[in-house]
Amino acid sequence: MNEPKIRQHLRFRYGKDEVLMYISHRDMLRFVFRQFRRIRLPHAYSEGFSPKPKVSFGPALSLGVRADSELLDIEMKDGVWWTAEEMADNLARLKENSEPRIFALGLFELPAGAANISKAVKQCRYSLLFDGPIEPIAEVMDSGELVFTNHKGKASDQRKAVLSWEISDGRLEVHADNSERVLNVISLATIISERTGQRCTDMLRRSLLDGDGNEL
């Protein structure tokens, strides 16, 4: 018989649309915590003079990128142990009490010993849409280095973080590393725009993946 876990850990899946893609990561978390307070979600708090919710979250989204499947891990209070039915009921309450433009998509229990989301995410999938023909986009992706130089003069080759890519339904779909090399999707879109003269009209992070490429 397995020893009981001291505390239950839940994973919350949510999305944000094109209106919220311009708010900061910190502001986004404030919106999510407000949802939790509305349903009185019994999560644990850190100790000290300024206790904070005991949560962990995936890699921050760049401003201007919307999301289909963001993840937040929640450590519950001592003595609180939600069943599958309670999780389903509280997910429904989260949906009813959600902030405008934030979409509650899932709430489920993490298995014992599972890595928290901040450590589990090793890869990401992005989808980009440009306002012109797709052929020049493919030519850029087929070229060699994809070097972006920031305002401080620091250069980075975004190619090194691209694990694979494809064109699907007129969009550029990118499978990217998020461990040793981290893709800056804004930089990638800027490179493509500069080389093709096209404007990127939509940037979406579709999913967060583990080291084997499985969706978390």
Image (cartoon, rainbow, N blue to C red):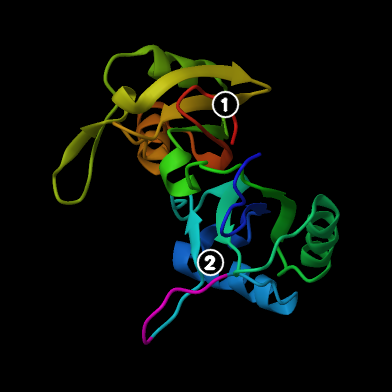
**What's the amino acid at mark 2?**
Leu
Q: What residue lies at 26% left-to-right and 20% top-to-bottom? A: 145
Callout 1: 10 Å neighbours few (<14), some, many (20+)? few
Residue 48 belongs to the span the image colors magenta: yes
What is the CA distance from the residue labelled 2 to the residue labelled 1?
A: 25 Å
The residue range painted magenta reads 44-49
Give the percent coordinates (x, y) of residue 48. Answer: 37, 82
Kindly report which numbered mark, 2 or 1, lies closer to the viewer in this rendering: 1
Q: What kind of secondary structure does the magenta stretch mostly adopt?
A: loop
Q: Which mark is residue 29?
A: 2
- Residue 195 located left or right of residue 4: left
**What's the amino acid at mark 1?**
Asn
- Residue 82 located left or right of residue 215: right
Callout 2: 10 Å neighbours few (<14), some, many (20+)? few
- Residue 208 located left or right of residue 156: right
Q: Which mark is residue 172?
A: none
Looking at the picture, does residue 6 appear above or below residue 213? below
Identify the secondary structure beneath mark 1: loop
Name the quarter where the C terminus is drawn: top right
Residue situated in front as seen by the camera: 102 or 95: 95
Residue 91 belongs to the span the image colors magenta: no
Is tag 2's residue or tag 1's residue first in the polypeptide sequence? Answer: 2
Identify the secondary structure beneath mark 2: helix
Q: What residue lies at 62% left-to-right and 46% top-to-bottom? A: 110
Residue 169 lies in quadrant:
top right
Give the percent coordinates (x, y) of residue 150. Answer: 22, 46
Q: What residue lies at 48% left-to-right and 33% top-to-bottom? A: 198
Looking at the picture, does residue 3 appear above or below residue 45? above
Q: What residue lies at 34% left-to-right and 27% top-to-bottom? A: 161
Instruction: Give the residue at mark 1.
Output: 214
